[in-house]
Amino acid sequence: MFLTRKLEQLPRALPETIFASAYAPFSALLPHARAFVHHGGIGTVSQSLAAGVPQLVVAMALDQPDNAERVERLGAGVATTADRFTAAHALPLLQRCLHDEAIRRAAAACAERLRTRPATDRLVAWVESRQVPSRRFAQAARAPAGDTPPVYLIPGLGADSRTYREPWDEVPGAVYVEWPEYHGEATIPAVARFVVDAWQIPDGAIVVAPSFAGAVACEIANIRALAAVVLVASSPDPADYVALARSRRLRPFIPEAWLQRFLRRREGIRRQRYGHTPTPFMLALLNGIEQFSVCQLSFHRDMYEAMVAWPGGIAPHARVLRIHGRHDSTVRPPATADLMLDGGHLVIMTHARECVDFVRSGLADGFEAMVRRRDAA
């Protein structure tokens, strides 16, 4: 059976065994189907799971590739993309849906789970436990645990709080922040003054910042008496940002707005092709591309110019600790770092476990003691 609102696209002479219609309710149709080939929209996926029918998901755009990957992860079907969909490629996938008992059992199990939905209060608790970082920020900023100082996890310029995925949620007092709406602040100190108010950063807080955002963290330390500044693949010295001049020369030739739109359209397909069994670097790269594709482009562009003009420096009383990848070609690695990792510029994501353990150790032992031990050595 074919369901399509564009019946004119089908061959005029269909075999008697094939029926075509512009509409049929999935809730009535799918329980009688042995397999279902569809585009991967969230409503269609949900109806398929509820019916327990094996799915061949042909993802095209938007959330569809992500939905397709989740169907495969559940074992309830198989997936491909529209640009790969040919008879030779699709037929073996469809045969798996029809004859693979593991897929059929997984699809039936999904239907059973949907039939036995949890009580509403349990569902609300589950949703609240998975709030987006910007909501967690609001909670953490108001009520850090016990005497633990708030640890502000600042994303890179042009990035967002998805920089700090698991295991960063293990950091006590973690405060996830997003860059506020940009109002034309033209210098790094001006941005720092703005975010200190927007994020309500108090004296005694700890700030973690990667890459160019480290410059903002240094300026925050000139405004607030921070307990510590943890620079990850970053530096208080503008001369260390060795890729800045090269990137600045290329920027006039890069159609950034078009690039953002292109990356958003290809996001799901990109993850489906490269994200099934990603290396830490590939996962970090995909994460960074996704963040750039939705960042405030004017803020991202203006901050490059602001970095060129930034004089650098940090308050003499500030406790600065540095985590760096020895293979970083964007920000020059220091001769000695408090934590030197075998990675590149994206160590905050590729080596998240080591970074988190370092921050937790600083919280447990005291960042002041860490700095004293380092300076004594």
Image (spheres, grey):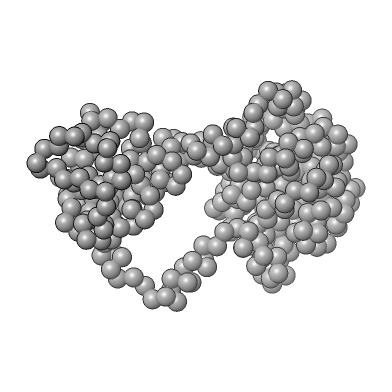
Q: Quadrant of the C terminus?
A: top right
Q: Name, please, the residue furthest toward the right.
A: 316
Position of residue 166 relative to residue 301, above or below, is: below
Q: Nearer the viewer, residue 88 or 286?
A: 88
Q: Name, please, the residue furthest toward the left.
A: 16
Residue lying at 65% horizontally and 67% vertically, measured from the top left: 139
Is 72 placed left or right of 362 in the picture?
A: left
Residue lying at 49% horizontally and 66% vertically, measured from the top left: 127
- Residue 71: % across, % down: 33, 49
Q: Nearer the viewer, residue 21 or 278?
A: 21
Residue lying at 31% horizontally and 65% vertically, measured from the top left: 114
- Residue 370: % across, % down: 75, 52
**Camera sees residue 377:** no
- Residue 220: % across, % down: 82, 51
Residue lying at 34% horizontally and 57% vertically, measured from the top left: 46
Is 67 placed left or right of 345 in the picture?
A: left
Q: Nearer the viewer, residue 335 or 145?
A: 145
On the image, which quarter does residue 303 sit in?
A: top right
On the image, which quarter does residue 5 sit in?
A: top left
- Residue 373: % across, % down: 78, 49
**Camera sees residue 22:** yes
Is 238 placed left or right of 5 in the picture?
A: right
Position of residue 372 relative to residue 271, above or below, is: below
On the image, which quarter does residue 259 sit in?
A: top right
Figure disc tally = 0
